[in-house]
Every structure is written in structure tokens, then in C-alpha cells.
Image (cartoon, helix red, strand yellow):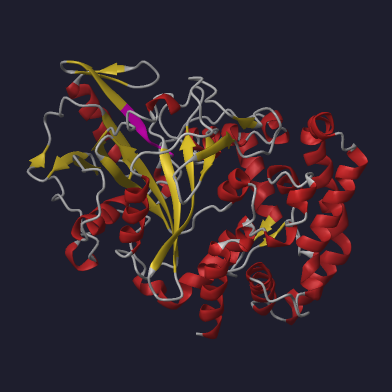
């Protein structure tokens, strides 16, 4: 018997809700190569993980064991990345009192505070024995990938790049790959090194600190069905849900589906991240749908496919959204979205602080995720105007793009339609999730206005710092995050 249709985020109304277990995806061979890891090919790693979530591929399994060794988490909220950071030794010293300093010190002090005497001794011994060799290996690797290209573009020699990386790692805890990702070989950006907010600080502990006081009542951002229900009740526009695919059934509000609407469809895991597991099925003829790989299925066959997938994990079926006509030439077919950060303000409301416009490129025509090989351009918050676009910056091939690599359409200087409405929608949406300090919104700008696609309660900040060329610790978001962290520590 089909499970009753439900988009409720109220646990009392749900009957045996499905687990948000990302390991419940189908098994396949990942096909990752050692060369992909050595080349910092993040899109290849991303694709391999999607294809092989159980990590049966030997290279993929080795990669994750390596990363597990580099990022020790254990029972603690605060991670240690690579090895204990050298700034831990002087974290008790007074700083300049600026937002970035408060953020850095909060991370270092929580890392120290959570560990007992023996673990602290191990941290200190690790700094003595491991800090230099591990960071020299990281510097050598990052320089081998990027050093020659930077020397050609800027004239800065390899020795100077190495020296700058070692100094930044020792003084500012900036790991070698981010020296190139944030273009810190440029003097202007390097002078702001102390103000960058790092991924290992936010995702490695500070986001957990901000959620800790209300851990039992967190809003449903990870469960897309519950998220859609919350948005609908609060009048926040999201894409409609056509059906819930779960436990071998595809059901809408009226019951089990035997037909699909004659529209392009988008299917995504209820609890997935970063576009993983998503599928796009275009309606190309009566009773016929085709995906990006050219596979064509009838309505009955597509329903059977969705039922089979739902045995492994729950999915949502939605209509495929299309970009506004004014930005359609900035897409290779995948939906381009605005990643917009909102943060709780000192007055208790919510404020939109930073945004980028994400675009898919190449063969990936399903999602615009940065880690899947997409590009992004910073957005001027006042005007909605785009800057040049770029990728993650871990390798030199892409660099900065004034035009879209696939379509040739101009990116830099374009103004997004409905920009004031997009900002207002994000702020209003945050009001529906008031317990969250910071949320990263994925918002599509459609022909009839902006529409929330998803919300991320632990947003990546690197994409904003890379695309804008400015550290967030020196911007409004840094001040608001520092205030929230101080309040969490005081509570």
C-alpha cells in the first residue's frame, strides 16, 4: 500500500519518515583515477562519489581514507585539518578585535577547549613533528599544479610563491591550495589575508557551535520535502512538488500516479546535497521523456525507473524550471541559480549580505554546482550586476571568464532581472527558519520572478570569497557571524 502523500515537517504528523541517509544511493563503479586526485580534479571526485556512494572503487576508497586522516573529527565538534594549526600556539594573545580575528580565535579556542590534557599534549606534539612536513607537501603539490601558470601571468617566481604559502600557513592558517584559490599571489589580496574566513573553521566547527543551543529544534533544511512544506506554509515561493517517490511508490496528493504530466521533469533526492543524484527528464514527444545522456523512456518506463530508485532513497519530482529569458544564454541547459547568503542581524531580523550567480558548463546539464565543475560570478548587492566568472581556482586552466565558455554570452556587466525581488524573497524566506543564524539560498530567477530552490544551513563561503576577490571577514557577513559566535559562546 502506498504511503500517504505528506509534505509535513511536523514529526507528530509523519508516520515512519524515511531516513535522510545519503549512503542509501545505488551502487555503481566510481572510475576515479589516482591522476584525478593528484590533479585536484574536484569535479572528477564529485562525479565518482555520485556514481559510487558506497566507495567500492579502490581509488575512491583510498582518497576518502586519506582525507579522513587529514581531517580528524572524532567525537569533537571542532575538526583539525591537516594537522594542528600553528596559530593555535598564540591564539590566547590579544588580537585587533576585528570580526575575522574573533572568528579565528573562536575556532582555535574551541579546538583547544574540547580536548582533555592528553589530547592537548598530542596537539602540541603534532605541531612540533608534523606541521612543517605536511604543509611542505601541500605547498609542493599546490605549486606543482599552479606555480608555472602564475609565474607566466604575474612574473612571480616559484621560490617567492613557496615562501608566501609557508608564511601564510604559519601566520594566517591559510592552507596551500587556498593561496591559489584566493589569488593570494596578488599583493592586494595578500594584504587582506588575515580577514579570510576559512571552510575548515565554519564547516569544521563554528556552524555546529551556532546550532548547538537549539539542536533539538532545528528547522528542516536538509529534508527537501519538509523544507517545501515549511516554505509553503509561510508563503515563500518554491517550485511545486508533483510527486513523492518513496519505498517503491510514486504518489501525489490524490494517490499513486499512473500518468506523468506532459512537462519537463526534475527529480532530486529528498536528502541529497550539491545536486547529487538529481536527474532531468525532458518531455520530447507524447508519452516520451529523454535525459541528458540521450536515454528515452515512455511514461510507464519512467514511472518504473522512479519507483526503482525510490527503493534506495526517497525522491521528489518537480517540474523543470527554466531561467529568465534575459539570462538563458548564460546556461548550457542546466538551471542557473543565485547563491545568496542571509544572516541574522544584530536587531534580530535577517539581512542579505553576499551573492554569486552560478552557471553550469560543459557536459553537465543537470546542476550548476561549483564542485561539479560549474562557474560563478559575484553579484553587486546594490545593483544585481555580474562580475567575471570563475571556477574553484584550484587549477589554472579555467581562470576568469568574461563570457560563458559554452554559449559565448557576455557575463561581466550583465544585470540580473528581478534583483530587488530576489533579495526580498531571501530575507522573507529566512524568516520562515528563524532558528538558523546563516542560510545559503539557491534561488532561480524565472520569467515571472524569483523562486527558492533550496536552503543550505551550512553554506560554503569559499565561492563568495573566490568570486568577489574579497575576504568575508572584512565585510558585513563577517561582523554578523562574529556577533553570533560571541552570543553562542556567552550562552
Residue at point 71%, 31% (across, down): 396
> Magenta stretch?
276-280
Residue 56 falls in image quadrant: top right
Residue 305 falls in image quadrant: top left
Residue at point 34%, 39% (across, down): 445
Q: State the image coordinates of residue 173 (x, y, percent, origin top left).
A: 75, 60
- Quarter of the image that includes the N terminus: top left
Residue lying farthest right? 159
Q: State the image coordinates of residue 144 (x, y, percent, origin top left).
A: 82, 35
Q: Which is nearer the eye, 83 or 463?
A: 463
Check if residue 279 falls in the magenta segment: yes
Q: Which is nearer the eye, 196 or 275?
A: 196
Q: State the image coordinates of residue 146 (x, y, percent, origin top left).
A: 77, 35
Q: Which is nearer the eye, 461 or 213?
A: 461
Check if residue 305 falls in the magenta segment: no
Q: Main secondary structure of the magenta part?
A: loop
Q: State the image coordinates of residue 123 (x, y, percent, origin top left).
A: 77, 70
Residue 17 showing in the rendered view: no
Residue at point 17%, 23% (across, down): 300
Residue lying farthest bottom? 490
Residue 101 falls in image quadrant: bottom right
In the picture, measured across the screen, residue 184 lies left or right of residue 51, that is right
**234 versus 65 height, above or below:** below
Residue 67 showing in the rendered view: yes
**168 versus 408 height, above or below:** below
In the picture, measured across the screen, residue 106 lies left or right of residue 302, that is right
**205 versus 383 height, above or below:** below
Amino acid at each position: 500500500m502506498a504511503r500517504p502523500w505528506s509534505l509535513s515537517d511536523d514529526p507528530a504528523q509523519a508516520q515512519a519518515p524515511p531516513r535522510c541517509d545519503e549512503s542509501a544511493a545505488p551502487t555503481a563503479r566510481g572510475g576515479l583515477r589516482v591522476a584525478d586526485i593528484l590533479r585536484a580534479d574536484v569535479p572528477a571526485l564529485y562525479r565518482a562519489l555520485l556514481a559510487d556512494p558506497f566507495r567500492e572503487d579502490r581509488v575512491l576508497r583510498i582518497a576518502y581514507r586519506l582525507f579522513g586522516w587529514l581531517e580528524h573529527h572524532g567525537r569533537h565538534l571542532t575538526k583539525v585539518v591537516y594537522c594542528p594549526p600553528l596559530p593555535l600556539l598564540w591564539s590566547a594573545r590579544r588580537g585587533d578585535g576585528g570580526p575575522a580575528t574573533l572568528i579565528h580565535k573562536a575556532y582555535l579556542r574551541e579546538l583547544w577547549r574540547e580536548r582533555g590534557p592528553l589530547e592537548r599534549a598530542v596537539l602540541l606534539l603534532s605541531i612540533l613533528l608534523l606541521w612543517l612536513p605536511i604543509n611542505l607537501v601541500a605547498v609542493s603539490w599546490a605549486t606543482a599544479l599552479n606555480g608555472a601558470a602564475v609565474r607566466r601571468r604575474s612574473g612571480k617566481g616559484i621560490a617567492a610563491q613557496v615562501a608566501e604559502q609557508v608564511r601564510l600557513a604559519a601566520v594566517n592558517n591559510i592552507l596551500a591550495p587556498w593561496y591559489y584559490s584566493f589569488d593570494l599571489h596578488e599583493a592586494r589580496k595578500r594584504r587582506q589575508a588575515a580577514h579570510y574566513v576559512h571552510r575548515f573553521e565554519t564547516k569544521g566547527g563554528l556552524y555546529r557551535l551556532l546550532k548547538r543551543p537549539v539542536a533539538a529544534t532545528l528547522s528542516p533544511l536538509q529534508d527537501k520535502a519538509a523544507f517545501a512544506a515549511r516554505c509553503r506554509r509561510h508563503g515563500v515561493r518554491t517550485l511545486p512538488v508533483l510527486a513523492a517517490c518513496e519505498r517503491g511508490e510514486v504518489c501525489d496528493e490524490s494517490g499513486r500516479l499512473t500518468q506523468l504530466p506532459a512537462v519537463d521533469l526534475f527529480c532530486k533526492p529528498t536528502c541529497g546535497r550539491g545536486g547529487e543524484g538529481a536527474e532531468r527528464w525532458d518531455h520530447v514527444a507524447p508519452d516520451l521523456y529523454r535525459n541528458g545522456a540521450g536515454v528515452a523512456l515512455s511514461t510507464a518506463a519512467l514511472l518504473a525507473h522512479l519507483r526503482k530508485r525510490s527503493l534506495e532513497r526517497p525522491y521528489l519530482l518537480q517540474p523543470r524550471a527554466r531561467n529568465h529569458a534575459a539570462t538563458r544564454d548564460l546556461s548550457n541547459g542546466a538551471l542557473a541559480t543565485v547563491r545568496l547568503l542571509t544572516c541574522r542581524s544584530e536587531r534580530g531580523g535577517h539581512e542579505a549580505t553576499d551573492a554569486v550567480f552560478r552557471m553550469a558548463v560543459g557536459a553537465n546539464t543537470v546542476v550548476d554546482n561549483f564542485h561539479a565543475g560549474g562557474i560563478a560570478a559575484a553579484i553587486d548587492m546594490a545593483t544585481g550586476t555580474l562580475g567575471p566568472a570563475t571556477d574553484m581556482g584550484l587549477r589554472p586552466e579555467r581562470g576568469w571568464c568574461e563570457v560563458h565558455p559554452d554559449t559565448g554570452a557576455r557575463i561581466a556587466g550583465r544585470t540580473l532581472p528581478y534583483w530587488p525581488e530576489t533579495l526580498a524573497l531571501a530575507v522573507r524566506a529566512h524568516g520562515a527558519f528563524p532558528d538558523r543564524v546563516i542560510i545559503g539560498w539557491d534561488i532561480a530567477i524565472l520569467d515571472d520572478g524569483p523562486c527558492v530552490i533550496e536552503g543550505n544551513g551550512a553554506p560554503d563561503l569559499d565561492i563568495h570569497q573566490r568570486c568577489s576577490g574579497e575576504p568575508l571577514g572584512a565585510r558585513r557577513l563577517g561582523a554578523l557571524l562574529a556577533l553570533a559566535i560571541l552570543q553562542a559562546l556567552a550562552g
